[in-house]
Amino acid sequence: MSVSRPSTFDPHYLRYLGDLGATNLHAAAAVATERLRSALALEPGKRVLDVGCGTGSTILKFASQLSIHVDGVDFLEEMLRVARVRLRVAGLRNGLVQADATLALPFRNETYDAVFTESVLGIQPPESAATFLNEVWRVLKVGGRFAANEGVWKTGTSQHIIAAINEACMKDFGFSVASCAGWSKDDWILCMRRAGFTVVGTESLNLHAPATVDHSMIAHFSRLVTLAFRLRAMLNPRLFGLRRHYQQLLEKHRDDHHHIEANLFVAIKTY
């Protein structure tokens, strides 16, 4: 049975970031992506799915460095528009589809050797998260890995703080910063197990650890695409006005991270 999006879900801030061509839109940024890649243990020739691929920077990195095929799905056309340009400039023909994993993924059963998410699963309410994980389990091959780099509530965070932060984020950005049910790491592990996964590892990620800079030609092209979209946005009066607006809101929320931790979950479809 399909699960509808909450009527209040309106990720206008994410649409804005898509228009900017922004990258690393997840907890612990590039460091987390590096750890996620290692956890997936990908081999050449494997087929991989990025659920919530954003503007395509992780797809580009994985596909160019690991000799694998990576498809991407995202809910927002603003993100996919940039991803198409980024991949085309790099000479890649990876598949990109607009889809909502909380409803259904448009792929056959057991299509992928691995699936991953970055700050996409963690913002879902319980009912949407269950459908999301069931769909990931369905399209993943038996023995395949699912890795999720997500921001979750720190254990012991009060429901009052969770409710206040999420209410403010819904108002200011159009989506919850983390589970509206206040799920911590253990709650997410239980949800993954209920979907049929065997969780083989969790890792807390350092939000401030330095990342290795990629000096490859393809990474250079990717940065140029991001720069082009940012320059384009500066010439758009609407987007230029939104820049100041969101900067003020981000300053208002700068202490929210004290209650949230970045975690990397690794699970396997064992049957």
Image: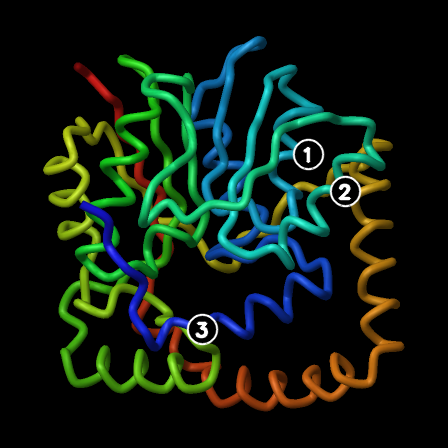
**Mark positioned earlier in the residue sequence (2 or 3):** 3
Q: Are marks 1 and 2 in contact (CB under 8 Å)?
A: yes
Q: Are marks 1 and 3 in contact (CB under 8 Å)?
A: no
Examine the image and state in which quarter residue 44 appears.
top right
Separation of residues labelled 1 and 2 (CA atoms): 8 Å
Examine the image and state in which quarter residue 133 appears.
top left
Give the residue pinned by disc 2: 86
Residue found 17% across the figure and 27% down from its top: 198
Give the residue pinned by disc 1: 60
Mark 2, other Cα within 10 Å: few <14 / some 14–19 / many ≥20 = many
Q: Is residue 111 left or right of residue 21?
A: left
Q: Is residue 6 above or below residue 212?
A: below
Q: Are marks 2 and 3 in contact (CB under 8 Å)?
A: no
**Mark positioned earlier in the residue sequence (1 or 2):** 1
Residue found 19% across the figure and 29% down from its top: 197
Separation of residues labelled 2 and 3 (CA atoms): 25 Å
Mark 3, other Cα within 10 Å: few <14 / some 14–19 / many ≥20 = some
Give the residue pinned by disc 3: 10
Q: Is residue 264 above or below residue 197?
A: below
**Mark positioned earlier in the residue sequence (1 or 3):** 3
- Please state which of the two labelled residues, at mark 1 or mark 2, is closer to the viewer: 2
* Amino acid on which the number 1 mark rests in the picture: Leu
